[in-house]
Image (cartoon, grey):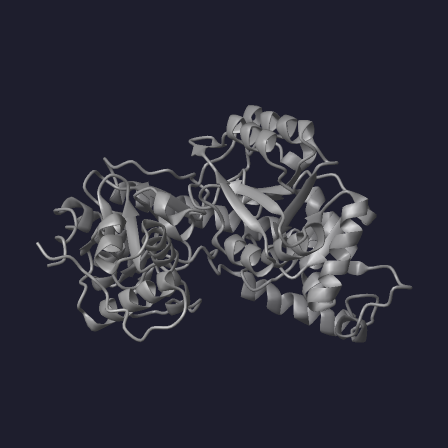
């Protein structure tokens, strides 16, 4: 039986990259079909007259580029088009009324925020808002004046039950910016940072840009496992760990208080800094206490108005111990100078007049209704979700691969995100997908998308192709 052997004639550069380039070209040309099994790396090394280390490195690079997927005990297979890297760039943030049904974007429902915005802008126009100084909302901050944005940050943190003083609160342009500013301020190139094995996908891109090494730690139904964190801290010297304890991205797990206390104890023993991303926390009324409340001297706490009030209200908040907060402010200045004062003023007004509470409850109501639709659609299947969450985690039935489901769903007009997009090690990603329930504005479209996924899963599993001849 013939095996796939790339033609490396005339290719320059390292041999392992030449193999990857040839692989990409053969996939694009249709010479390698989706699901085709590649030869074991030792067989390919023998055929090319190269070392097994070279072909192993080539396969690892091909996995990282989402060209192939490795399945433990089975082999290496060509991915269907439109894997995690392509999907991230192909799908945009528009909420289309037609075309593919997008269950891949974890944005909140738009809700009635626009109506509230109209009234708030009218108030600003007629009453002058900020002590009659509208011009101040369109000017650079003056260090000699009280920082209105800092007051808004403290008001938001108070709503979330996170104690903070003015010198501990930093305002950013959303929580993603808060995370980037935290990494920029608190790490140096070459540092090791830890996170869950499945994590917020932009973290990996940020770390790569900043020259950081990322290690993923095992998860269970309650989130990151403390014993895994203990073992790695004992053997290495990580700078910090990034965690999403409430409605974990992407598994929707909520870490119980006992687990949270165990993790901060491990962090204390090893002088480990924790970054707590709590963007979904305001949706969960009975959530355990944030890590920042359990260990305020060791936790940088991140939150945002965008996930619970309105997606375009890009007001992020970071709460950190005062010495670290000063470094974060420097990173904010370096990356964007300041958060827009007008955005902070709108957020502050909504917090003060109760609009923030009403909009958050409206998000919960939409989430409850849509989670009920999903529970009905996937009755009899394992799903992991919270009634007020914006997404759910769907481990796939035996025989299905996440790659095959994503590809089949795409052919039927539904976008989903497979586990590999969130995995620190894509080759070790479980066979599961994340489904987001709030991006689609129309619930009929959402229901059709969910029903399509269920119909696909009720059919025969997507087949893995034969060894290339």
Front residue of this view, candidates 110 and 86: 86
> In percent of the image, x 48 and y 55: which residue is there?
108
Is 320 positioned to the left or the right of 58 in the image? right
Q: Quadrant of residue 140?
A: bottom right
Q: Could you say where residue 17 lies in the image, as x and y percent from the top left?
A: 37, 64
Is 429 positioned to the left or the right of 315 in the image? left
Q: Quadrant of residue 136?
A: bottom right
As drawn, 354 above or below 74: below
Is 155 positioned to the left or the right of 426 in the image? right
> In percent of the image, x 46 and y 57: which residue is there?
109
Q: Could you say where residue 117 lies in the image, as x and y percent from the top left?
A: 61, 66
Front residue of this view, candidates 141 and 421: 421
Q: Could you say where residue 415 lies in the image, as x and y percent from the top left?
A: 31, 59
Q: Quadrant of residue 100?
A: bottom left
Is residue 339 at least partly visible in the picture? no
The residue most toward the right is 144
Q: Could you say where residue 130 lies in the image, as x and y percent from the top left?
A: 80, 66
Is residue 299 at least partly visible in the picture? yes
Q: What is the total number of numbered labels drawn onto the structure image?
A: 0
Q: Quadrant where the N terminus lies? A: bottom left
Q: Quadrant where the C terminus lies? A: bottom left
As drawn, 244 above or below 315: above
The residue most toward the front is 49
As drawn, 156 above or below 146: above
> In percent of the image, x 15 and y 57: which residue is there?
3
Front residue of this view, candidates 152 and 18: 18
> In percent of the image, x 53 and y 44: which residue is there?
283
Front residue of this view, candidates 123 and 104: 104
């Amino acid at each position: 039986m013939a095996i796939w052997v790339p033609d490396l004639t005339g290719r320059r550069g390292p041999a392992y990259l030449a193999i990857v380039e040839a692989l990409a070209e053969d996939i694009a040309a249709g010479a390698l079909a989706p699901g085709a099994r590649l030869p074991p790396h030792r067989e390919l090394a023998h055929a090319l007259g190269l070392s097994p280390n070279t072909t192993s490195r080539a396969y690892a690079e091909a996995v990282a580029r989402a060209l192939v997927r490795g399945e433990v005990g089975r082999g290496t297979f060509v991915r269907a088009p439109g894997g995690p890297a392509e999907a991230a760039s192909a799908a945009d943030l528009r909420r289309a009324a037609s075309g593919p049904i997008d269950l891949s974007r974890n944005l909140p429902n738009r809700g009635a925020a626009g109506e509230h915005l109209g009234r708030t802008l009218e108030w600003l126009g007629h009453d002058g808002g900020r002590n009659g100084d509208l011009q101040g909302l369109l000017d650079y901050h003056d260090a000699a004046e009280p920082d209105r944005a800092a007051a808004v940050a403290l008001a938001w943190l108070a709503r979330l039950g996170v104690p903070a003083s003015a010198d501990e609160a930093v305002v950013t342009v959303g929580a993603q910016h808060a995370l980037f500013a935290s990494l920029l301020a608190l790490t140096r190139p070459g540092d090791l940072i830890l996170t869950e094995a499945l994590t917020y996908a932009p973290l990996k891109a940020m770390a790569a840009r900043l020259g950081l090494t990322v290690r993923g730690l095992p998860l269970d139904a309650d989130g990151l496992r403390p014993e895994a964190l203990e073992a790695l801290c004992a053997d290495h010297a990580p700078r910090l760990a990034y965690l999403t304890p409430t409605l974990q991205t992407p598994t929707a797990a909520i870490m119980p208080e006992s687990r949270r206390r165990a993790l901060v104890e491990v962090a204390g023993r090893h002088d480990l800094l924790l970054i707590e991303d709590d963007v979904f926390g305001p949706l969960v009324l009975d959530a355990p206490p944030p890590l920042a409340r359990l260990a305020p001297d060791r936790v940088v706490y991140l939150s945002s108005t965008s996930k619970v009030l309105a997606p375009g209200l890009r007001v992020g908040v970071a709460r950190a111990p005062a010495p670290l907060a000063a470094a974060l402010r420097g990173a904010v200045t370096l990356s964007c100078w300041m958060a827009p004062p007008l955005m902070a003023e709108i957020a502050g007004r909504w917090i003060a007049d109760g609009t923030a509470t009403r909009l958050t409850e409206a998000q919960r109501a939409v989430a409850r209704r849509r989670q009920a639709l999903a529970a009905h659609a996937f009755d009899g299947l394992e799903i992991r979700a919270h009634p007020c969450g914006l997404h759910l985690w769907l481990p796939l039935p035996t025989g299905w691969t996440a790659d095959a489901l994503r590809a089949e769903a795409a052919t039927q007009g539904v976008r989903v995100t497979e586990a590999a997009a969130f995995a620190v090690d894509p080759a070790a990603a479980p066979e599961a997908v994340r489904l987001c329930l709030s991006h689609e504005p129309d619930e009929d479209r959402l229901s059709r998308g969910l029903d399509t996924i269920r119909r696909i899963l009720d059919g025969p599993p997507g087949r893995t192709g034969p060894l290339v001849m």
